[in-house]
Image (tube, helix red, strand yellow):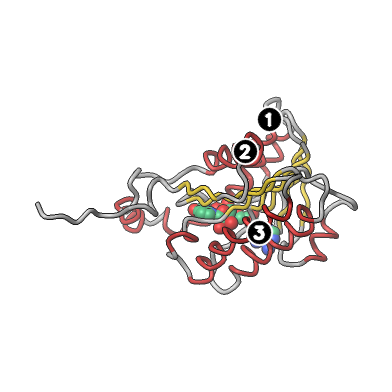
């Protein structure tokens, strides 16, 4: 299938691109940055059963998306992974950017079969920067909205990871004190790898055929951590 993955030069998007390539798909990565060197090497290796094409574009700019992709390009699967965790611009990139891409390449696309939007556990807990949490809460609602509008020809779901070991989190992963504090709060005592989230993306986006408008929280129990208070 023809698959478009935004944020394909970063941790989760890059891992998803590699996973889809292993499964033999035609993968189009869209990112504000150049393609990841290791992904390009992988796409030329014997392990790769598909083909990779990279497109430079900014999801916050509709003209940039239009001009960055080949004319008439229509994906069958859309994976919205591009995102930031910076503060003020988070809603522009994580939510409005996702809306730009999905409206253009899923809602107005007769070829589309499946959409997967990447949110965050933060959309459930409200933790992290205010704009980040709000952007990810918006992803849950927007996913349901798209699911209703593209049915019956296609499905749309979202995935909310907890901590994932990508560059986005370098600042805490490299600080042993902060990292130990995080692990104390994480029931499974580890974060997910980007490759693990890529498997979920594939399952929800391709293996799945009947679930739509839903959100999967994949966080090692982080959001559900609760203490039972009761007399001894
Ligand atoms: P990352 O920083 O490793 O990768 C993000 C990619 O998005 C980068 O390649 C970046 O260049 C691209 N990007 C940023 N702004 C863009 C724009 N305007 N237009 C096009 N591309 C743009 O981050 P990641 O950890 O792989 O995160 C991917 C998604 O997963 C994000 O939406 C993030 O919020 C979400 N997420 C990550 C974690 C985590 O712990 N890493 C947890 C939950 C959710």
Q: Residues within 10 Å of mark 1 (few under 14, many from 20)?
A: some
Q: Residues within 10 Å of mark 3 (few under 14, many from 20)?
A: few
Q: CA distance from mark 2 to mark 3?
A: 21 Å
Asked if 149 appears above or below 127 in the picture, the reply is: above
Q: Is residue 89 visible?
A: yes
Q: Quadrant of ligand 1?
A: bottom right
Q: Position of residue 206 (x, y in %)?
A: 66, 37
Tell whether label 2 touches label 1 (CB within 8 Å).
yes
Task: Give the quadrant of residue 111.
Answer: top right
* Mark 3, residue position: 145
Q: Position of residue 103 (x, y in %)?
A: 75, 59
* Mark 2, residue position: 202
If the image is split into quadrants, where does the N terminus sit?
top right
Residue at 33% x, 50% y is 183
In front: 160, or 64? Answer: 160
* Mark 1, residue position: 23
Asked if 111 appears above or below 87 in the picture, the reply is: above
């Amino acid at each position: 299938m023809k698959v478009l993955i935004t944020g394909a030069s970063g941790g989760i998007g890059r891992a998803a691109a590699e996973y889809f390539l292993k499964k033999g798909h035609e993968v189009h990565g869209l990112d504000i940055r150049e393609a990841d060197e290791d992904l390009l090497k992988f796409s030329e290796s014997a392990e790769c059963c598909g083909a990779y094409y990279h497109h430079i574009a900014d999801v916050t700019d509709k003209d940039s998306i239009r001009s960055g992709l080949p004319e008439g390009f229509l994906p069958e699967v859309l994976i919205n992974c591009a995102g930031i965790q910076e503060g003020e611009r988070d809603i522009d990139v994580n939510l409005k950017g996702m809306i730009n891409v999905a409206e253009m390449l899923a809602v107005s696309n007769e070829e589309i079969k499946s959409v997967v939007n990447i949110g965050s556990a933060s959309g459930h807990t409200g933790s992290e920067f205010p704009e980040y949490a709000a952007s990810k809460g918006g992803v849950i609602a927007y996913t349901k909205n798209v699911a209703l509008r593209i049915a019956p020809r296609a499905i749309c779901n979202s995935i909310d990871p907890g901590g994932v070991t990508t560059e986005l989190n370098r600042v805490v992963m490299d600080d042993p004190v902060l990292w130990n504090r995080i692990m104390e709060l994480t029931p499974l005592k580890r974060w997910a790898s980007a490759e693990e989230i890529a498997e979920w993306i594939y399952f929800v986006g391709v293996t799945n055929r009947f679930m739509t408008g839903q959100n999967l929280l994949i966080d090692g129990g982080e959001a559900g951590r609760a203490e039972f208070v009761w007399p001894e």
